[in-house]
Image (spheres, rainbow, N blue to C red):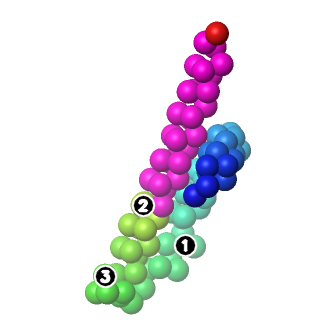
Amino acid sequence: MPAKLGHKLLRRLQLRESWIIFFIMGIIMMNFPFLQIFNKPDTIFGLPLMFLYLVVGWAVSIFVIYLFTLGVGNSDEKRRETRQP
């Protein structure tokens, strides 16, 4: 990922609205309609569809949290750099 694009992405993820949107998406993901959609006896690679849905959702949420922490870390470093004469 080019540095300019990565910097823009991380700066955008720092917004409070982004935190709220991803939190609400996580709550929606764990509610009735989505859980019912994936609660079927079908399997993919021998694993139940519900199990894969939960594991992939868990992994994606961890990745999003990782991106947010990168954004917070970058903003802290910039604050330190601007304070030094």
Specify the segment rendered in magenta.
60-84
Cα–Cα span, label 1 and label 2? 17 Å
Q: Which mark's residue is nearer the viewer, 3 or 2?
A: 2
Residue, disc 3: 47
Q: Residue at x 53, y 33 (%)?
A: 73
Label 3 CA crowd tier, 10 Å (few <14, some 14–19, many 20+): few
Instruction: Pinpoint residue 51: horizontal percent, then vertical percent.
Output: 36, 73
Label 1 CA crowd tier, 10 Å (few <14, some 14–19, many 20+): few
Tell me: residue 78, above or below residue 55: above
Cα–Cα span, label 3 and label 2? 16 Å
Q: Which mark's residue is nearer the viewer, 1 or 2?
A: 2
Residue, disc 1: 34
Amino acid type for the residue under numbered disc 3: Leu
Q: In which quarter of the image is the N terminus?
A: bottom right
| Marks 1 and 2, the one that precedes in the sequence | 1
Label 2 CA crowd tier, 10 Å (few <14, some 14–19, many 20+): few
Tell me: residue 16, above or below residue 23: above
Instruction: Pinpoint residue 77: horizontal percent, then vertical percent.
Output: 56, 27
Instruction: Say whether residue 68 is magenta.
Output: yes
**Horizontal placement of 26 versus 85: left or right?**
left
| Marks 3 and 1, the one that precedes in the sequence | 1
Helix, strand or loop at label 2? It is helix
Numbered-mark total: 3
Residue, disc 2: 59
* Badge 3 vs badge 2, beta-carbon distance below 8 Å: no
